[in-house]
Image: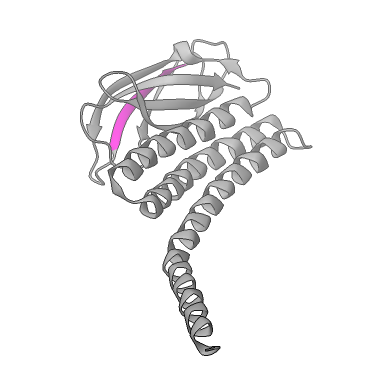
C-alpha cells in the first residue's frame, strides 16, 4: 500500500528532470548570444573612455573608429547567434534587425566619441553599391577637403534597402586629405545583404 504513491512521485521527478535537460542547450545558446552583445557594448565603452582620458584627439579618434569597425562585426556575429538560439523565420528576422541596430550603434558611438571633430558630411560623396569578391556590399567614397589645412576623416556609412530602411552600417577612416584635395576609400558591409542596396554617408567628421 505504501509503495504505489512513491512510484508515482518518482515518475514525476524523472519527467521534470528530462524536460529541463532538453531545454538546457537552448538556454546556454541564448546566454552565449547575450554575452556576445554585452562584449560589443564594452568595446564601444572602452573606445569612448579613451577619448576622455589623457590621449590626444587623433589617437582617441583612431581608437574609437577602429573599435567601431570591430564592434559592428562582433555585433553581427552576436545577433546571428541569437537567431540560432531563437530558431525559425521570426528569429531570423529579429536577428537581421538586431545586427543592423547593433552596427548603427557602434558606428554612431565612434563618431560621437571624437572630441573637437568638425561636421564634414558635405565633403563626402557616396557612389553606387556593388558586390565585392567576398559577397559583401561595397560602395566607393570620394572625400574632398574643402578646408584650409590637412584633415583626417571618419565617416559612418549606412547601407539601406530600397525603402530606406537601414540594413547595416560601418565606419571608414580616411587619413590626411590635403587642403583642396580629394581621396578615395571603400565602405564595406559587415555581412551579405540581399535585394536592392543603397549607401549613404549618415555622418562624417574631420579633425
> Is 173 located above or below residue 29 in the figure?
above
Q: Give the x, y percent position of residue 182.
A: 41, 19
Q: Give the x, y percent position of residue 67.
A: 56, 42
Q: Is 72 one of the magenta-colored residues?
A: no
> Is 182 located above or below residue 92 in the figure?
above
Q: Give the x, y percent position of residue 28.
A: 49, 62
Does any portion of residue 180 appear in the rendered image?
Answer: no
- Residue plotted at (28% across, 18% down): 163
- Residue plotted at (39% across, 50% down): 86
Q: Which quadrant of the structure image shows residue 54?
A: top right
Does 37 sit left or right of 79 as displayed? right
- Residue plotted at (55% across, 35% down): 65
- Residue plotted at (29% across, 21% down): 127
Does any portion of residue 70 appear in the rendered image?
Answer: yes
In this picture, which residue range is highlighted in magenta? 137-144
78 and 131: which one is in front?
78
71 and 121: which one is in front?
71
Q: Quadrant of the C terminus?
A: top right
> Is 15 located above or below residue 157 in the figure?
below
Amino acid at each position: 500500500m505504501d509503495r504505489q504513491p512513491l512510484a508515482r512521485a518518482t515518475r514525476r521527478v524523472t519527467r521534470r528532470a528530462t524536460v529541463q535537460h532538453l531545454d538546457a542547450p537552448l538556454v546556454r545558446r541564448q546566454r552565449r548570444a547575450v554575452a556576445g552583445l554585452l562584449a560589443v557594448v564594452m568595446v564601444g565603452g572602452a573606445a569612448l573612455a579613451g577619448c576622455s582620458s589623457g590621449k590626444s584627439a587623433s589617437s582617441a579618434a583612431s581608437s574609437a573608429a577602429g573599435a567601431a569597425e570591430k564592434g559592428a562585426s562582433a555585433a553581427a556575429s552576436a545577433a546571428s547567434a541569437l537567431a540560432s538560439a531563437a530558431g525559425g523565420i521570426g528569429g531570423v528576422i529579429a536577428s537581421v534587425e538586431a545586427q543592423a541596430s547593433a552596427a548603427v550603434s557602434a558606428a554612431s558611438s565612434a563618431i560621437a566619441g571624437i572630441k573637437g571633430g568638425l561636421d564634414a558630411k558635405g565633403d563626402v560623396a557616396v557612389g553606387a553599391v556593388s558586390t565585392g569578391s567576398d559577397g559583401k556590399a561595397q560602395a566607393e567614397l570620394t572625400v574632398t577637403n574643402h578646408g584650409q589645412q590637412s584633415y583626417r576623416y571618419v565617416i559612418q556609412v549606412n547601407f539601406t534597402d530600397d525603402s530606406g530602411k537601414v540594413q547595416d552600417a560601418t565606419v571608414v577612416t580616411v587619413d590626411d586629405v590635403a587642403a583642396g584635395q580629394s581621396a578615395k576609400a571603400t565602405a564595406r558591409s559587415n555581412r551579405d545583404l540581399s535585394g536592392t542596396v543603397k549607401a549613404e554617408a549618415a555622418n562624417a567628421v574631420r579633425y
